[in-house]
Image (cartoon, helix red, strand yellow):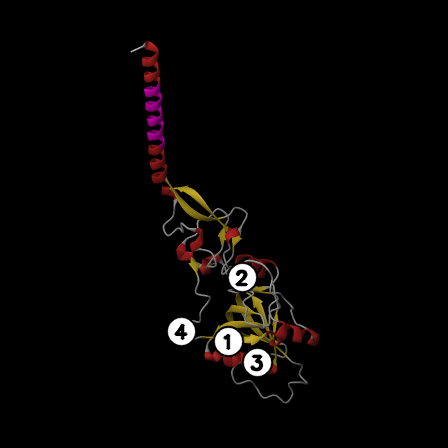
């Protein structure tokens, strides 16, 4: 065998051996990385998910995290969190835990039922979002208007201005077609000229994805005019609300809930 041929054979063998060794080391590194790192869903940097805020694709990212840094119950796939809501604030860079997520749509608890009221009877004092804890007041009509009214049966009238009825949680904000729009702006009392548009115009359909619609409805500007707000109330609370409506305007304001009380 010629030396030149032998040299070529040796060179090819060396290249094949080198390629095999490189492939083997890459495979071993991949296996090691798979054991040391794993995908986990986190809140995107610069984002913040508030309680009962619907989670959209823009809120989250899938990253490779060291296995020993992954918390128990961490979500591993983005599709498992889209459309769900967090029960507490989650900040940018935090892992999403399945124990802190809910998709129960704020269903009534035992002894409660969902009641929705036309917005014309309710005055929001602050910006309100679905899931917010709120105080419900009644602001009384003038003394002349209430002159012939008997004392209320289901709540106590302690002064001539306003009384706190109870605390609750905003369970829904809907347009006239029953479409959820999440956000209610303060002092949104439509004029009589606007009422027809609210109760007959319905939702203004827009060419946007559901996730984008949720984002705009919840955090920017509702895509339709709100017409109804809903609460999960006991029978006694419902009686208070309906009776109070005859004595004045219902007023609803947001309660700041501390982190300790939500944990």
The residue to which callout 1 is attached is 115
Q: Secondary structure at mark 3?
A: helix
First in sequence: mark 4 or mark 1? 4
Judge by depth and name the residue closer to the eye, 165 or 195.
Answer: 195
Q: State if disc 3 and disc 1 touch (CB < 8 Å).
A: no
Q: Secondary structure at mark 1?
A: strand
Q: Secondary structure at mark 4?
A: loop
Expressed as whole percent of the image width and height from the top left, the position of residue 4 reads 35, 11
Residue extending furthest toward the top: 3
- Decide: few, some or many residues near mark 1? Use Cα within 10 Å; few <14, some 14-19, many ≥20: some
Q: Magenta includes 252?
A: no
The residue to which callout 2 is attached is 256
The residue to which callout 4 is attached is 110
Q: CA distance from mark 4 to mark 1?
A: 14 Å
Task: Say which of marks 1 and 2 sits in front.
Answer: 1
Res. 191 image quadrant: bottom right
**Which numbered dot is residue 244?**
3
Res. 126 image quadrant: bottom right
Q: Secondary structure at mark 2?
A: loop
Picture quarter with the N terminus: top left
Task: Say which of marks 4 and 2 sits in front.
Answer: 4
First in sequence: mark 2 or mark 3? 3
Task: Say which of marks 3 and 4 sits in front.
Answer: 4
Q: Which residues are magenta?
A: 12-26
Q: State if disc 3 and disc 2 touch (CB < 8 Å).
A: no
Using the image, determine if residue 173 lies above or below residue 18. Answer: below
């Amino acid at each position: 065998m010629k030396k030149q041929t032998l040299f070529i054979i040796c060179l090819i063998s060396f290249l094949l051996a080198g390629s095999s060794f490189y492939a083997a080391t890459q495979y071993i590194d991949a296996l090691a990385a798979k054991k040391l790192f794993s995908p986990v869903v986190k809140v995107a940097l610069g984002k913040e998910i508030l309680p009962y805020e619907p989670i959209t694709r823009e809120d989250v990212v899938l990253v490779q995290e060291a296995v020993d840094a992954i918390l128990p119950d961490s979500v591993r796939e983005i599709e498992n969190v889209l459309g769900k809501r967090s029960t507490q604030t989650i900040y940018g860079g935090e892992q999403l835990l399945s124990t802190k997520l809910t998709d129960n749509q704020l269903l009534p608890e035992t002894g409660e039922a969902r009641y929705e009221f036309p917005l014309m009877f309710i005055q929001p004092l602050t910006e309100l979002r679905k899931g917010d804890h709120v105080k419900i007041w009644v602001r009384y009509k003038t003394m002349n208007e209430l002159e012939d009214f008997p004392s209320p049966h289901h709540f106590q009238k302690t002064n001539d201005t306003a009384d706190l009825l109870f605390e609750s949680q905003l369970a829904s904000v809907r347009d006239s077609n029953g479409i959820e729009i999440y956000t209610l702006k303060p002092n949104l009392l439509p004029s009589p000229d606007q009422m027809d548009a609210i109760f007959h115009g319905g939702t203004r359909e827009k060419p946007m994805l559901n996730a984008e619609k949720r984002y705009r409805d919840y955090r920017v500007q509702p895509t339709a005019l709100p017409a109804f707000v809903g609460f999960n109330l006991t029978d006694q609370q419902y009686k208070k609300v309906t009776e109070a409506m005859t004595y004045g305007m219902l007023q609803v304001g947001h309660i700041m809930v501390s982190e300790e009380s939500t944990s």
